[in-house]
Amino acid sequence: MCVIISLTEENYLKAIYTLSHLIDESEVSTNQISDHLNNKAATVTDMLKRLAEKKLIHYIPYQGVKLTEKGRQTAIKVVRKHRLWEVFLVDKLQFKWDEVHEIAEQLEHINSDELIQRLDKFLGKPKFDPHGDPIPDANGQLNIVKAIPLNQHKIKGMFTFVGVCEHSKTFLQHLTSIGLKIGDTLKVEEINEFDNSCKVKINKNNSQFFSNKVASNILVEIKK
Amino acid sequence: MCVIISLTEENYLKAIYTLSHLIDESEVSTNQISDHLNNKAATVTDMLKRLAEKKLIHYIPYQGVKLTEKGRQTAIKVVRKHRLWEVFLVDKLQFKWDEVHEIAEQLEHINSDELIQRLDKFLGKPKFDPHGDPIPDANGQLNIVKAIPLNQHKIKGMFTFVGVCEHSKTFLQHLTSIGLKIGDTLKVEEINEFDNSCKVKINKNNSQFFSNKVASNILVEIKK
DNA sequence: TACAAAATTTAGACTGCTCTAAAAATTTGT
DNA sequence: ACAAATTTTTAGAGCAGTCTAAATTTTGTA
């Protein structure tokens, strides 16, 4: 009944979960997984056979994979742990938001339901991690986030910065260097047709230009 | 220069460290390690060869092993992490002292110096874990504890309960059930020659009997 | 002190996870 | 529609860590 799932298997399930959510709930290919995890396609094929054996994924050779319900529950539990630990690292240990990913990658595999339940309570049952990503609840339910990238709005006006698409250290450090934090108000004052860059005021500060690349990785909601 | 040490290797080094400190700084035998880690002697021999290769232990076949300085530093870092995480679990997440060992066994392998430094600060740089065991500092220095088991004092009088020898769940739960916590004052009122049991008053409460077995696992200092 | 018992090591094998090289299947472009 | 390119799988191998069974070394004692 209670199949043991190794740290490596957890990482594969998380990868499949993440990749399948990039665009709707599509099937994930062997190469996508091998790129994401930095190992070879042959290695991935091997692992897919084992995960299918354990009923954690639906796998038809050459057709890509999808998580089973059991696989999804496992993956989402890892995501929940990852994001809760990130909150701990930032809120309690004063890490910066660009410093926590690697440590959370380790902590997410600590196995204790009691620990996670208590950590969640200790942190005040947070709904979002330091990057604005939603934290699944203990039952694996996830807030549906309706935020979309700033560059897709194509309109001037007031927005709230609620999350990022890109989680790389360099991008997060860039946002920090321009003084942008989750929750800030963005006022789009100009949109330039030719390169899709925009002039934005952060809170009450001076305006600055965001390239399309930056704007495409900033998730916002229209400010009420 | 910077040899990678696996989780398994860390566990072997910690086992050797622990076992070598049971009695002075003696050498540790293959069987002691295999008992402690619940695996076979042949498996231990294999690992000892690998640890010796990496200059983490001094190993002469059939002669037992001793940690090198590098091995000791590695082991003590794991012990430091284990004990700090135990403090976190008890002080911040309200775990009981008999519930934290298994979780700390996992957390002790999380690899981030920055994390440990910040956790230490967050916890108020504690000197002892919830069982009264000393926490090595960041340089691997350990407070020498001069506490000895209650049954070895052989005298009546006032003592302070500062730690335990036995760390099993059942023993710790037993102490909890008789209302004994680290820091409590023990007044030894009688010592029975025939079975070495003693009558003890905990703080200002009613007196009760401690068997020799209990008294031998309770570390105390003479109360000033 | 010699020999039996105990401790330890060696030999050979298995699993999980990884790789490279080669074969097979699928997709794409003309 | 089919050849070329791409993707995926298969085959075979290696390493870390574990095991059992057998051989070797040390220890304790008769």
Image (spheres, coloured by chain):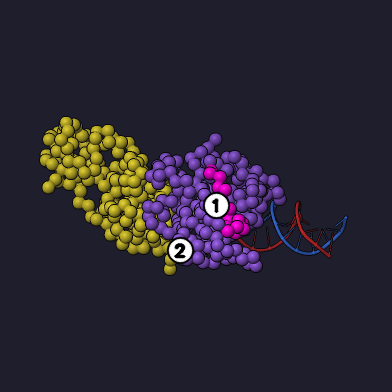
Chain colours: A yellow, B purple, C blue, D red
The spot of residue A171 in percent (x, y) is 30, 37
Magenta stretch containing residue A204, yes or no?
Answer: no
Question: Which residues, given as a range, are shown in magenta?
Answer: B142-156
Residue that numbered label 2 is attached to: B205
Badge 2 element: loop
* Three-letter code, disc 1: Ile
Q: Nearer the viewer, residue A172 or A93?
A: A93
Q: Is residue B101 left or right of residue A63?
A: right
From the viewer's side, name the closer residue of B43 and C3.
C3
The location of residue D6, given as percent across then percent down, is: 36, 45
> A172 or B111, which is in the foreground?
B111
Name the subunit of mark 2. B
Disc 1/disc 2 C-alpha distance (Å): 19 Å
- The answer to whether residue B140 is seen in the rendering is yes
Residue identified by numbered label 1: B222
Q: As shown in the figure, which amino acid type bears the numbered disc 2?
A: Asn
